[in-house]
Amino acid sequence: MQRVTYTTTRIGKGDLGRRVPLGNEGQEINALAHAFNEMLERIESLVRELKQITDNVAHELRTPITRIRGMAETTLTGSGDLNQYREMAASVIEGSDRLIEMINTMLEIAITDSGVAELAREPLDIREIVREAADLFKPLAEDKGIDIQLDIPPQAVIVPGDRPRLQRAVANLLDNAIKYTPSGGTVTISLETDTTRAKVEIADTGMGIDKKNISRIFDRFYRCDESRSTPGSGLGLSLALAIIRAHGGNIIMKSAPGSGTSFAIVLPRASSRR
């Protein structure tokens, strides 16, 4: 117990890497020390994640806030004409809307990840959600010269879930696929099912993702496009994963440079009884 007390004291002083050494004190003491060390690993991981999120938030907020401040200062100096003021006011509103959307998305991720989000577990035909997403993004895809193809079964595929949140998850993945697929490419949405699960796969013919980036693809604010030329906040995939995990499912990603990318949403099936 002295080792546990010493380790706890060191951690309280900021030494998060400290662990309780395992010795020959007996099975129960070693089991306690092992459980304590596992708890410390989780705490250290959460602290690292919080620091990374804080750094990312600061980076993402700094640029738009600086831009808004600059336009406000220009307005105060009175050095522009009426049309310039109108353009700057419109830019301020647009920038503010983006910040609000980003903050709302961050809050939604946090609430969903925490497990306190109240999900409406109603029986849903996942085919409807897939079709709605395809219809929603069809104009955007057509503008880019991208073909959206559907491959879904004729019979209903029922899953228990929260319709708005599942719609958001599918929409985020489809939006991501269209963003990173060049003109003339194809995005295919397929639906497979068995007695225990349903799988919605969204596959594109885009540039693919390098192996070194795959492990970070669901990180908040992470974007493969380091130049930031592709629009987006880097939160869409994080939110999609949080939503699907809250439904007891998972998202499986496959990708390789030059071979496109696929995201497969795997959800548990509802009972046939209603």
Image: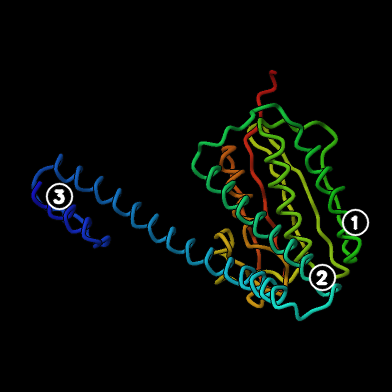
Q: Earlier in the sequence, mark 3 or mark 1?
A: 3
The mark lying in front, picked from 1 and 2, is: 2
Give the residue displayed 90% in from the left and 56% down from the top: 139
Nearer to the camera, 224 or 192 = 224
Give the residue type that dot 3 points to. Val
Q: Residue under circle 2? A: 87
Marks 2 and 1: in contact by CB < 8 Å?
A: no
Quarter of the figure with residue 162: top right
The figure's colour scheme reads rainbow
In three-dimensional space, the C-alpha distance between marks 3 and 1, rounded to whole angstroms, equals 61 Å
Q: Which residue lies at the image location 80% right of the left edge and 31% below the top edge?
A: 156
Residue under label 1: 139
Is disc 1 placed on a helix, strand or loop? helix
Q: Percent x, y for residue 267?
A: 64, 39
- Is residue 155 visible from the viewing direction of this image? yes
The disc placed on residue 4 is 3
Within the image, what quadrant is residue 212 found in?
bottom right
Q: Amino acid at mark 1?
A: Pro
Left or right relative to 124: residue 26: left
* Disc with the residue nearer the chain's start (1 vs 2): 2
Q: Which residue is nearer to you in this view: 20 or 232?
A: 232
For residue 263, what is the image quadrant?
bottom right
Give residue 177's mark.
Answer: none
> Would residue 73 be found to the left or right of residue 1 on screen?
right
SS state under label 3: helix
Location of residue 91 with respect to 7 vertically, above or below? below
Q: Residue at x 71, y 35 (%)?
A: 163
Q: Going from the N terminus, do you reach mark 3 or mark 2 first?
A: 3
Task: Measure the alpha-carbon separation of dots 3 and 2.
Answer: 62 Å
Res 260 visible:
no
